[in-house]
Amino acid sequence: MSAGVWLLVVGVCDLLRAARDTTSVGRRVLLVLAGLAALLFVAVSSRFPPAWWGTVGACWLLGLAAWVLTSSLALDPSSSHRHRWRAGAFCCFAAPLGLLVLVGARPLPSSALWSWLADRTVVGSVGGAVFVTHLGVALALMSTSNVLVRLVLDAVGVPAVANERQLRGGRLLGPMERLFLLGLAAMGQVAAGGVVVAAKGLLRYPELQRSGRDQGATDVSEYFLIGSFASWLLALGGWTLVRILG
């Protein structure tokens, strides 16, 4: 459940970012402080033993701060060495999450907070670990995955900022698509995800064709293919985490 809590807080922080890629220094600091405060509240209310502070606690706090700052700088056109910030952002997301999956798979220590949630909310019917993991993955697929997809597009040279003028709605369609795929997988309808993939291609085909006809060879097709496959892989990764941690 530790990985689920971290994804939950990271997802909320990414959801509170500005709609555009560029965020001010003050907004970055506020997001980091808010995320750290939320994680510290959970840690204190759960009465972390000293050993947890050196493993789970460090992954929570350092991982969140590093992810928010590096990803913000990587997406900011005015920042220098964006390729280094981008590589750092990928590492700052994958490394803490991987460590939390390895060392933080066991439930959090019991506390008054978790007992209250289990007694008075839907948490009690589905189980605390399952609820937090599903909610954390869902929020990460909504917000954090958008940031990851945009970093991937920047890395391969087809930035989303330029190409989304041709294919509008990607910021909204991506989260909806990932949540829908996660829901299908949760219901055991993994094969039905192929229908979503095919439908997206058919719906986007007229726009891709028109863009190629009007402007000749463009990056729009590559933007669509790479962005879509990155989004689908993140949805698959989210379902894998749900199976492992839930």
Image: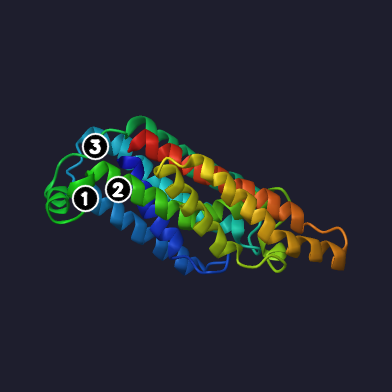
Residue that label 1 marks: 123
Viewer-nearest of discs 2 and 3: 2
* Percent of width and height locating residue 155: 68, 48
| Residue nearest the observer in this picture, 183 or 102 | 183
Residue 107: image tag: 3
Within the image, what quadrant is residue 90 found in? top right
Q: Where is 213 relative to 55, above or below?
A: below
Left-right relation of 168 to 104: right
Distance, label 2 to label 1, CA atoms, is 8 Å
Q: Where is 124 relative to 35, above or below?
A: above
Residue at horizontal 34 percent and vertical 36 percent from the top: 245
| Residue nearest the observer in this picture, 234 or 113 | 234
Quadrant housing the N terminus: top left
Residue that label 2 marks: 132
How packed is label 1: few (under 14 Cα within 10 Å), some, or many (20 or more)? some
Whether residues under marks 2 and 3 lie with C-beta atoms below 8 angstroms apart, the answer is no
Distance, label 3 to label 1, CA atoms, is 14 Å
> Which sits earlier in the primary sequence, circle 3 or circle 1?
3
